[in-house]
Amino acid sequence: MMGGMSAQPTDDEIQSTNTARGVRPPNPYGRFAAVDGLGGVAAPLLAGFAVTMVALIVQIVDNLRWPDVSLVLLGGAAVLLLQVVQLSARARGYAVTPAQAREWYPDIGRDPARAGLVDWELRHHLDCWRDLVRRARWRYNVAVILLLCGIAVMLVPKKAAELTAVRGFAIAVIAGGALIEIAAVLADWGSRAPDGSTRSRLPPLLRWAAPPDPPVPPEPYPVPPETP
């Protein structure tokens, strides 16, 4: 069931698993599906768009002021987005729910050792999934920044007289989008820092770029009454 990324658990680890209260679910519950959408839909579309823009730049290179810079930025974005697709595909192999894993073992309800081993493997799978997703998200965020910067640079005309007010506004909007993405990445980076550190002060400062998750009710919702 496990790949070659880990060794078999020791007796102590299996024993600790048997006394544990199951495997912690992903938070939010739909995180597996969200990551599938990132690597299976968004990243391929953006990668194709970046490659198309590279081909376009080659055709209109004489009309651009910094075509080489745009090629580097958009090419880097395409490479990173393709890596996101690969990492997301690998992560999908570790996105297993307890019910899916236990379908392989009909004796799991009667064999505590088997149940402990499966729970240990599920935790290992979740750790591997989180590591691959972390690497994919980092590449995706950087790729989006490079993509926006590449488009903004591409919009700069070769002749200054051709830079109209509307063209300048379009460049400013796209460049502003890149700055917002950078701020969101920094806020997410700071949210994982220890409390009291300099990095931990970034999320409140950059809340405008990275809105927080919806508020969680202070107490669980009441159990709905049973219908007669």
Image (cartoon, helix red, strand yellow):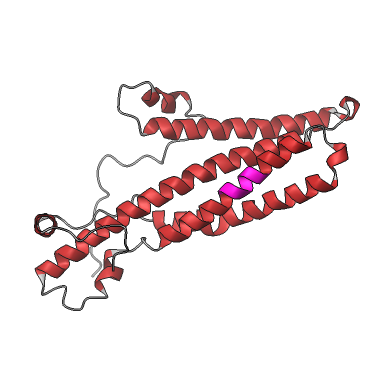
Question: Farthest residue in the bottom direction?
Answer: 106
Residue 224 higher or lower than 151, as above or below = below
**Residue at the spot x=46%, y=54% of the render?**
35
Q: Nearer the viewer, residue 75 or 126?
A: 75
Left or right: 48 in relation to 4: right
Image coords of residue 103 (percent x, y): 27, 75
Image coords of residue 66 (percent x, y): 78, 33
**Residue at the spot x=11%, y=72% of the render?**
111
Q: Quadrant of the N terminus?
A: bottom left
Q: Quadrant of the C terminus?
A: bottom left
Q: Nearer the viewer, residue 61 or 208?
A: 61
Magenta span contains residue 78: yes
Q: Nearer the viewer, residue 77 or 26?
A: 77
Magenta highlight range: 75-80
Residue 92 higher or lower than 220, as above or below = below
Rendering quarter of residue 107: bottom left
Rendering quarter of residue 113: bottom left
Image coords of residue 55 (percent x, y): 77, 51
Left or right: 26 in relation to 84: left
**Residue at the spot x=16%, y=73% of the render?**
108
Left or right: 85 in relation to 16: right
Image coords of residue 175 (percent x, y): 67, 31
Magenta span contains residue 85: no
Residue 224 makes an appearance in the image: no
Residue 108 makes an appearance in the image: yes
- Dominant secondary structure of the magenta stretch? helix
Question: Farthest residue in the right direction?
Answer: 161
Q: Nearer the viewer, residue 170 or 69?
A: 69
Residue 101 higher or lower than 168, as above or below = below
